[in-house]
Amino acid sequence: MKKNTNTFTFEEIFEQNKRRIHYHLHKLNIQDPHQEFYQEGLISMWSAYKNYQPDKGPLSTYFNFIIRHRLIDLIRKESRRIEREVLASTEEEATFEAEVYHKASNTNFSGLTVKENIKSDDYLWQQVKGILTDKQWKWIRYYIIEDKSLKEIAEQEEVSIEAVKSWGKEAKKKLRNADFEKVIIESIDP
């Protein structure tokens, strides 16, 4: 492998070819206020100068190839970084909002949670139980009254988490159609 035997210094080559970097920045429609992409182009030009093999083709073609592809690689890298940051911040916001919403929806003005208030109303629960199937009642009992997670219920009942979710969905539908809507639904689905 024959290395660069050119007598020109990199500074001379750079002065002759620095517009190539700007050309590729423009061609790829890159906004570069902090000169990060320009620096990457400069580094790629240096790399191309050092690794150039005259028997493989003209230096200008090699510069174009290396600069363009390094800039595209940097665009991809920046896009992935931004995507991860946005995804992480979105997940953090969603988690925070869910926690705040859950706490706010479970507390009434007397300081007791809605679940604590309706938990002791046996008459209400007997009426609710009367309109639900056994599986739907299990969801109400475990998820609402006993505050178990879907996973815990699924393990206890030896079914999938999706099955437990389905019980809850059907129970919510029935309760929305019944006269219990204002009392129960607020604690289930505020």
Image: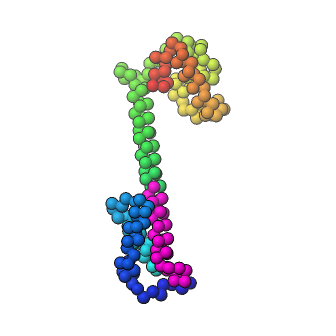
Boundaries of the magenta span:
51-79
Residue 174 x/y as whole percent: 57, 18
* Residue at horizontal 48 percent and vertical 84 percent from the top: 4
Placement of 32 over or under 167, stated as above or below: below
Q: Is residue 68 magenta?
A: yes
Q: In the rendered image, is residue 138 in sight?
A: no
* Residue at horizontal 49 percent and vertical 75 percent from the top: 62
Residue 166 x/y as whole percent: 60, 28
Q: Quadrant of the C terminus?
A: top left
Q: Is residue 123 magenta?
A: no
Outermost residue to the right: 158
Is residue 169 found left or right of 47 in the rendered image? right
Query: Mainly helix, strand or loop, the magenta region?
Result: helix
* Residue at horizontal 43 percent and vertical 53 percent from the top: 82
Q: Viewer-proximal residue, 12 or 77?
A: 12
Q: Quadrant of the N terminus?
A: bottom right
> Tell me, what colour scheme is on the image?
rainbow
Residue 92 placement: quadrant: top left
* Residue at horizontal 38 percent and vertical 71 percent from the top: 19
Outermost residue to the left: 33
Residue 71 x/y as whole percent: 45, 65
